[in-house]
Image (cartoon, rainbow, N blue to C red):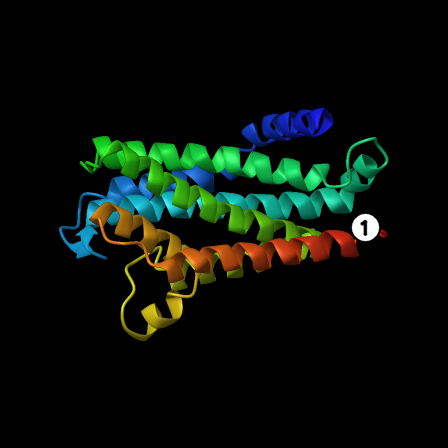
Amino acid sequence: MRSTLMLTQAELKRLLRNKRYFLFTVALPVVLYLVLGRQVNASVYGVSFRAFYMVDMAMLGAFSGALNGNAIRISQEKKEGWIRQLRLTPLPANAYVISKVIVSMAITMVSIVIVFLLGRFYGGVHLPVWEWFAVAFVVWFSATIFAALAVAIGYNFAPDQVQPITMIVYLGFAILGGIWYPLSGALKTVGEFTPTYQAVKIGTDVIEGSAVSAGLAMGLVVWLAVFIGLAIVAVRGTAETV
């Protein structure tokens, strides 16, 4: 356990020097909220647009950070032989994957906190303390889904393939999940099955004071189980070749 934590600490230090990672994880959602957060006077999913867009941008930073940066780094490190080197050390077999997920979740929390602070002091969103924590947890938990998917993609594909694949996955979940704009009509019917939509809708339901749909909550759990399964298969499938 101690060796895994040491690897996690080293991974975190490396990530903190990655400016590109922070551009998409922190800077992009912050800029978008500053531009649009107070410009629209409307109600979305039963809450003000300012509250909706706050949850939306927190989700954008969390899931893009967990997916895009991780998948590319894992694939590159696999190609360079870093994963194989670690397997020659006394580290537990799953230490590398665990460290990646922990670091991802630590960094995505930074994005969530910053966007929520913007929502409170720039957007004028006022919530009871417990709702801030509840919505943050929903977004943070949802990001773990994409951290698991990043492992599956990074292990399965070469670096030159990972970037377009992650971009397609990223745009797909962003558009179908209603990250860029609220969904309606047939697109909403499809989007309701995506973890991005489910996380945002649960967050807005908490803010609105509505009962959280068990179907939405179960949807997130199912997505997490599916992507963890894909990650396990990917890691085991490359165990003998990496």
Instruction: Indicate whether 191 appears above or below 54.
Output: below
Report the residue at 60% width, 25% height from top. Answer: 13
Q: Amino acid at mark 1?
A: Ala
Task: Find the residue positioned furthest to the left.
Answer: 41
Looking at the rendered structure, the secondary structure element under dot 1 is loop
Check the picture and name the quadrant holding the N terminus. Answer: top right
**Quarter of the figure with residue 180:** bottom left
- 208 relative position to 217: left or right: left
Report the residue at 78% width, 57% height from top. Answer: 237
Q: Position of residue 185 (x, y in %)?
A: 28, 73
Viewer can see residue 236: yes
Closer to the camera in the image, 208 or 123 = 208
Q: Position of residue 103 (x, y in %)?
A: 57, 34
Instruction: Indicate whether 144 appears above or below 123.
Output: below
Q: Position of residue 23 (x, y in %)?
A: 46, 38
Q: Label 1 belongs to which residue?
A: 239
- 68 relative position to 182: left or right: right
Instruction: Indicate whether 14 appears above or below 196.
Output: above
The crowd level at tag 1 (other Cα within 10 Å; few <14, some 14-19, many 20+) is: some
Report the residue at 52% width, 38% height from top. Answer: 105
- 131 relative position to 106: left or right: left
Closer to the camera in the image, 99 or 212 = 212
Report the residue at 27% width, 52% height from top. Answer: 205
Q: Position of residue 153 (x, y in %)?
A: 64, 55
* Tag count: 1
Viewer can see residue 158: no
